[in-house]
Image (cartoon, helix red, strand yellow):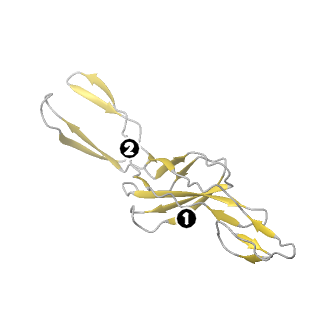
Amino acid sequence: DFKVDGKSLGAVGSYTFSDVTEPHKAQGVFIRSTTASLTSAVSAGYNSIKLSWSKQVGVSGYVIYRATSSTGTYTKIKTLSATTTSYTNTGLTTGKPYYYKIRGYYKNTLGNYIFSGLSTTAKGAVPKLATPVLTITAGVDKLKLTWKAVPGAYGYKIYKKTSATGSYYRVKTISGGS
């Protein structure tokens, strides 16, 4: 916002004083016209996505927006400080895609917020379950399979194949546990 003699002229690139016969007071906020950009959005577990971005010079902080489609309506979900370059969005639905955009903001001495443009490219990710780490113990005519419980999993399906070139088929479904 640019003000001349207390009157707001909005966001202007220039202003010309004409017929100047007395002092005028001009006040403006000038910030870099850069746009923040997300560098990554990746699953951070069954119900979360981690976002990362590069630090934008001169900002007071960042605002993160989320939508459920790349062309959908983006809603503000978090405001973060200027020193932050990552954020983990939690409480999401496993398997559902989410899309994110970011913008920087500057807070001037009057307490007003001036925002950079919203990032033009959305980064998308899907929260997903981790792959269990399987331990196989051989016994006489049997194999024992063990694994640690995967956060967010409600059960497990066990598959096997009988030859290197064969197809997998399900042999057991286990509800909960490990």
Residue located beneath label 2 in the image:
177
**Image height check: is 105 above or below 18?**
above
Instruction: From this view, report whether residue 57 is shown above or below residue 110.
Output: above
Q: Residue at x 55, y 65 (%)?
A: 76
Q: Picture quarter containing residue 138?
A: top left
Residue 71 visible in image: yes
Query: Helix, strand or loop at disc 2?
Result: loop
**Crowdedness near tag 2: few (<14), some (14–19) or many (≥20) residues, C-alpha within 10 Å:** few
Secondary structure beneath label 1: strand
Q: Nearer the viewer, mark 1 or mark 2?
A: 1
**Residue 92 can be seen, yes or no:** no
Closest to the observer, 139 or 116: 116
Task: Give the quarter of the figure containing the N terminus.
Answer: bottom right
The amino acid pointed to by label 2 is Gly
* Residue 149: percent from left, percent from top: 41, 41
**Residue 31 located left or right of residue 110:** left
Q: Position of residue 164 (x, y in %)?
A: 15, 27
Q: Estimate how packed mark 1 is, as few (under 14), some (14 to 19) or many (20 or more) residues with alpha carbons within 10 Å.
A: few
- Residue position for label 1: 76
Q: Is residue 104 above or below residue 17?
A: above
In this rendering, would 148 be left or right of 23?
Answer: left
Give whichever of 175, 82 is nearer the camera: 82
